[in-house]
Every structure is written in structure tokens, then in C-alpha cells.
């Protein structure tokens, strides 16, 4: 297949990890892929697919619209290219779909997450997100891709999309890059880690309080946070007061993998809000792959299908601190090695990107047949 993908992700940035993994997977399966997206100063070294940089506004709120305008101009200038299918990120779908439909290009929707910010801008983005899914309902876009069972159920109910037209592409992990450390065990203190957006609406500010309660209850614990966001300055200031807390700016993916292999428990603090209940957190798969136990709030976005009572603990948000402290007060550190191996085994069986790539290829083939 000759596939074109218009994405809002800056290729090479950490937020594009999923996009790059899926793109690499399509290429490895023998498909020709051209990505069209924003300019990026941190370009990946890959050669398996083509990347065309599009101009966009630097003004927040205008980025997606300006990128779509650039993509429209490019397709008009290259209207005779050989195209089997087009993937559209939801942020640009409603702007691009009318033109591409007039060219006869089969299209599918890529929805890695509804708007996540708690802001006025997010409310405007929800309108754009809804427009994109209505195009799937109206068969302008022939398939839609989501990240989880809950995400699928949400869009099918809201937009009356037939189940076969929604394909689930959960967040995966590079199992070669993210690996456990053979020597890593728990001796006296437990090392907790969270990496990703350090935004207040993700429950990040609850984590230092959890670690402080653990230490007060005789469970020696340390916390490492990595990322950027509106809580970064507050967290960095807090870390000056606690020797058990470190806060780092965002890191390259390889450095994240190295860091995780030295930790014991990965944290998923995101609350039970609409966005996080639909999610498939990339960090969850990375924690598993590195043999970390996982501790988080209990809702559909964090849960996995397989029973994992020993190496993954999810508690209701209102009980998160107290229940976590009680669990870890009773936790036998001698069990860590076995539980770590079970987490890694789960990642090897369920979290490889090959599952999502296969589902994406199926969505593309079915769209082409239906066009």
C-alpha cells in the first residue's frame, strides 16, 4: 500500500513515540509510507519512511488549523500522486476530509486521545474531535482507530459507529529498548517513578504526599519525576525540601528506558475523568517492559485485561493514599524479583507494537476494499 499520514505530532519529539512506532511497523511490513507533519528540530535517524515537513502557526489554538491548511496546499499541488489510503489525525480531519474525498482517497481517522487539557481551548478542541468522528459516522472517513476498549465503546455509543468500523491500537513498547536490569532488586528503600506530562490535571501533585506518607509509616521510599508541564515548577520547588524526591526535565527516550530499569514501582496517578478513563498510557507498557510493579488509580484507562493482582495495584482515587500505604506496609520485598519477571512476561505477550500495527493494517485494507 501507498499510505499518507497527516499528523499533528512533531516527528522526533517524545510525544511522537506512538506515531513513529506505528510508522516503523507499517514500513517493516512492506508498505510505502509518507508522513506529513510539523517541522521538528529533533529529527529521527530512521530511513524507512518519508517525512514531509509542513509549516504551521506557533500560536496555541491555531496550530492544527494552520497545519491542515498547509496539507491542503500540498495535496492540491500533488493531486496526481499514487495514494491507496490516507490516515488523518483527528485534529486535522474535518479540514482535510472534503478535499481528499473529492480526490477519491480512502481515509481513516487516528484518535490517540480526545483533548486532555482542562481549559477553554480544550472545549473548542472537543468540537473538532466530534466533527472528526461524525465523518466516520457519515462514512466520509471509512474507519476510526482508538487506543482502548473503553475508548472504542465511548465513540461507538456517542456517534453510533458500527463496531467493525472502530479498530483498537493500544499503546505498545519497544521491548528491546525497555528492559529490566538483571541486578535490580529491592534492598531497603523502594524507588517510585513517573514520567510524562507533569500537569496538575493528571494527579501529579498527589505523588509527593504519597511518598511522604510511606516514609512516615516506616516504608522507606524515594520518588523520581520526569517531564514538563504546569506542575513542574511547583514540584521542583518541593524537591528542594525533600531529599527523597528528584524532579528532572523531559529526557530522550533511551535515557527514560535506562532510568526505568533502575526503579521498582511505576506510578499512574491520572484521575477518573473522561479523558483518562479512555486512555492507554504509553508509560504503563514501558513500566511493564522494564519489570516494574505498577501502582495507580483505579479506572478503565489504567486497567489491563489479564489478572495481575501481584504486580499491578489500582485503588479508587479517594482511597489511593491510604490503600497504597497499607499495601506497601505488608509488601514482602523478597517477592519483587518474581513479580518483576511476571510484569516483563506480560509486556512480551501483550505489549509489543506488532499487535497495534496489525490492527492498523487491517483498518487500512478494509477501508480500501470499501471505498
Image: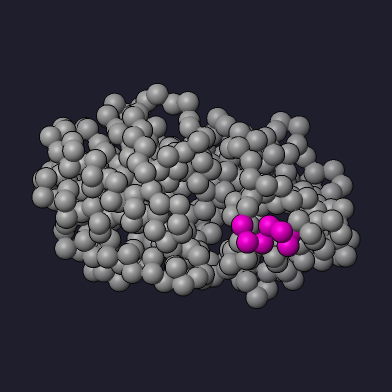
Left or right of 300 on screen, residue 202: right
Q: Name, please, the residue furthest toward the top.
A: 47
The image position of residue 207, as x and y in percent, is 72, 62
**In front of the other: 39 or 168:** 39
The correct choice, above or below, for 40 with respect to 284 in the image is above
Residue 360: which quarter of the image?
top left
The image position of residue 330, as x and y in percent, is 79, 60
Left or right of 334 on screen, residue 273: left
Residue 338: which quarter of the image?
top right
Left or right of 198 on screen, residue 119: left
Left or right of 243 on screen, residue 337: left
For the image, the number of numbered tags is 0
Q: Which residues are magenta?
A: 229-235
- Pick the quarter of the image with the N terminus: top left
Residue ID at (16%, 58%): 139
From this viewpoint, is residue 172 visible?
A: no
The image position of residue 320, as x and y in percent, is 68, 69
**In front of the other: 37 or 193:** 37
The correct choice, above or below, for 301 with respect to 285 in the image is below
Residue 268: which quarter of the image?
bottom right
The correct choice, above or below, for 45 with respect to 14 in the image is above
Residue 153 belongs to magenta span: no
Residue ID at (45%, 57%): 59
Residue ID at (58%, 67%): 201
From this viewpoint, is residue 20 visible?
A: yes
The image position of residue 269, as x and y in percent, is 63, 62
Q: How is the image coloured?
A: one colour
Amino acid at each position: 500500500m501507498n499510505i499518507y499520514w497527516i499528523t499533528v505530532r512533531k516527528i522526533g519529539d517524545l510525544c511522537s513515540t506512538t506515531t513513529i512506532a506505528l510508522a516503523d511497523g507499517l514500513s517493516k511490513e512492506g508498505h510505502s509510507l509518507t508522513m506529513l507533519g510539523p517541522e521538528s528540530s529533533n529529527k529521527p535517524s530512521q530511513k524507512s519512511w518519508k517525512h514531509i515537513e509542513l509549516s504551521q502557526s506557533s500560536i496555541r489554538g491555531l496550530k492544527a488549523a494552520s497545519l491542515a491548511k498547509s496539507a491542503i496546499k500540498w495535496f492540491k499541488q500533488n493531486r496526481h500522486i499514487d495514494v491507496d489510503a490516507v490516515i488523518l489525525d483527528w485534529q486535522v480531519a474535518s479540514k482535510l476530509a472534503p478535499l481528499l474525498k473529492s480526490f477519491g482517497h480512502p481515509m481513516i481517522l487516528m484518535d490517540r486521545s480526545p483533548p486532555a487539557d482542562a481549559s477553554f481551548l480544550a472545549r473548542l478542541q472537543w468540537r473538532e474531535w466530534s466533527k472528526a468522528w461524525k465523518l466516520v459516522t457519515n462514512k466520509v472517513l471509512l474507519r476510526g482507530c482508538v487506543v482502548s476498549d473503553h475508548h472504542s465503546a465511548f465513540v461507538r455509543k456517542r456517534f453510533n459507529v458500527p463496531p467493525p468500523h472502530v479498530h483498537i491500537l493500544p499503546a505498545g513498547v519497544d521491548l528491546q529498548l525497555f528492559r529490566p536490569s538483571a541486578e535490580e532488586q529491592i534492598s531497603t528503600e523502594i524507588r517510585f517513578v513517573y514520567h510524562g506530562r507533569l500537569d496538575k490535571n493528571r494527579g501529579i501533585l498527589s505523588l509527593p504526599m504519597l511518598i511522604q506518607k510511606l516514609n512516615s509509616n516506616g516504608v522507606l521510599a524515594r520518588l523520581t519525576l520526569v517531564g514538563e508541564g504546569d506542575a513542574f515548577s511547583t514540584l521542583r520547588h518541593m524537591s528542594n525540601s525533600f531529599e527523597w524526591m528528584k524532579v528532572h526535565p523531559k529526557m530522550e527516550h533511551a535515557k527514560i528506558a535506562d532510568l526505568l530499569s533502575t526503579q521498582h514501582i511505576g506510578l499512574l496517578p491520572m484521575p477518573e475523568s473522561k479523558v483518562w478513563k479512555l486512555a492507554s498510557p504509553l508509560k504503563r507498557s514501558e513500566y511493564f517492559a522494564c519489570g516494574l510493579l505498577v501502582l495507580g488509580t483505579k479506572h478503565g484507562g489504567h486497567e489491563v485485561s489479564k489478572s495481575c493482582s501481584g504486580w499491578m495495584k489500582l485503588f479508587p482515587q479517594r482511597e489511593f493514599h491510604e490503600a497504597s500505604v497499607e499495601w506497601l506496609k505488608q509488601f514482602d520485598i523478597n517477592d519483587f524479583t518474581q513479580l518483576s519477571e511476571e510484569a516483563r512476561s506480560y509486556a512480551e505477550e501483550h505489549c509489543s507494537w506488532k499487535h497495534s500495527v496489525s490492527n492498523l493494517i487491517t483498518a487500512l485494507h478494509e477501508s480500501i476494499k470499501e471505498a
